[in-house]
Amino acid sequence: MHSMARACAVTVSVFIEPFDVLFLRGNKLFGASGSYGESLVLPWPSVPAGAIRSALLASKGHDLGEFARSEIKDDPELGTPESPQSGTFRLSGFHLARRFVDGRIERLYAAPADLSATEENGRTIIRRMQPKSICNSLQSSCTTPQLAVLAEQERSKPQTGYWLPQEQWTCYLRGEDLKEDQLLRAEDLWKIDERVGIALDPTTRRAADGQLFSMQAVALHKAEHQHGSASDYSVGFLADISGAELPEQMLLRFGGDGRAAQATRQEHEAPEAPDECDYQSLLESQKCRLILTSPGLFEDGWMPTGVKKEKDGSSLRFELGGVKARLVCAAVPRTEVVSGFDVAKRRPKPAQRVAPIGSVYWLDELEASKKALRGLAEQGLWSGPEAEDPSRSVEGFNRFTFAKY
């Protein structure tokens, strides 16, 4: 019953805008004397999923303590803390976004791993890595048949911190050239505000001696800041929710210290996956790319769910949700670790390694139907509706989009 409800559920987007700075803490411990707490932009999808679920609980009038103890079992949307997948609520997408003064909202995407940006003569040059076979005499620990190679005449140092607006992201998915002058830098979207904290003695409730620490606060850009050419938009987050009836506005406790943010319901937007025509072109070429749009939590480390070695070890085969292909190349940044805090159980979540957002996988020998491609994009890189990690599935991990090879 729940699987059918999810299949026909309508996706609703909410724009999340903080009232002040945010503490988007990562997975590194801090709080000891002299320690430093870094912030993440974009935070893990579990942050908005938990904040929105908590706000929905409050709007429904549920007793939060009873829900945490799994005493409320009749909520068809939120399920229970022990079995969140029994409800229809799903976070299907989470992105940095900007809202222009005319009300238009645009998604923003961090540059994927197969793009390389360099500064040459005052210009930003974007180059794309391509899968290349290597000669047998060149030894490598790479497990894929091909390597992602960046062809350039002179050695250069890549620049980081670039973000793609929606239009450029669409060009990227189609394999078209990007317009470098339309890319955004991190400093156009947020600033880091260094804060100093003082540890408290839990017994006396006073400042502990010699226990100063520092941490990063994220100040997202607002239109009223009047910062150069970036004065016509405010930056926030866009979360795509399916399987839940959301109010027009919600007040959220977002990130570390429960900072206040407002979530405003938006008109439904077209999904970021290719349309029917693009699916057809992927099938005709029998090639495609998979790009992670949320952290990938896979049993085999960096290799997506569904990838297995053939018995003779000659190749890596991908088979998931009616889609079959051969994995020929991958561009995966350094592994990250996610955890978090389970409020209902009052204990930390397990630390788990994930493939970062923007990881790219090249597939050829593609065999599928348009229905299968669409279904897999909606399901995410999980083995099925009953995912390997139901809690992380509900929170929006393992989401991806297809792109041209």
Image (spheres, helix red, strand yellow):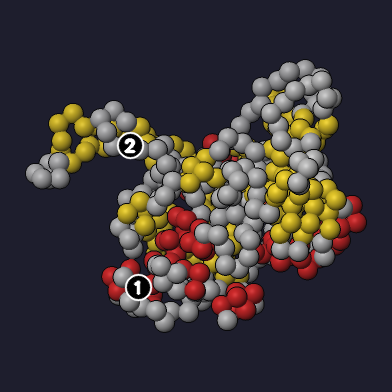
Residue at the left extreme of this rendering: 204
**Quadrant location, the N terminus:** bottom right
In the rendering, at what x and y percent does residue 266 appear? 57, 67
Q: Nearer the viewer, residue 216 or 295?
A: 295
Q: Nearer the viewer, residue 356 or 99?
A: 356
Q: Nearer the viewer, residue 262 or 362?
A: 362
Identify the mark at residue 70; answer none if there is no mark. 1
At horizontal 56% and vertical 55% (from top left) the residue drawn is: 397
Residue at the front extreme of this rendering: 312
Q: Which of labels 1 and 2 is toward the front?
A: 1
Instruction: Say above or below: 333 vs 319.
Output: above
Residue at the top extreme of this rendering: 154
In the rendering, at what x and y percent does residue 234 appear? 52, 51
In the rendering, at what x and y percent does residue 167 appear? 72, 51
Calculate the distance from the C-alpha at mark 1 to the C-alpha at mark 2: 32 Å
Left or right position of 44 against 107:
left
Left or right position of 114 against 48:
right
Identify the mark at residue 403; answer none if there is no mark. none
Q: Nearer the viewer, residue 30 or 366?
A: 366
**Other residues around mark 1 within 10 Å, as few (<14) / some (14–19) / many (≥20):** some
Residue 177 visible in image: yes
Q: Quadrant of residue 335?
A: top right
At horizontal 71% and vertical 63% (from top left) the residue drawn is: 321
Ranked by sequence position, the earlier of labels 1 and 2 is 2
Give the amino acid type for the residue marked by disc 1 in the picture. Ser
Give the amino acid type for the residue marked by disc 2 in the picture. Phe
In the rendering, at what x and y percent does residue 67 appear? 34, 72
Instruction: Say above or below: 254 vs 212.
Output: below
Disc 2: which residue: 30
At horizontal 54% and vertical 67% (from top left) the residue drawn is: 90
Q: Secondary structure at mark 2?
A: loop
At horizontal 43% and vertical 79% (from top left) the residue drawn is: 75
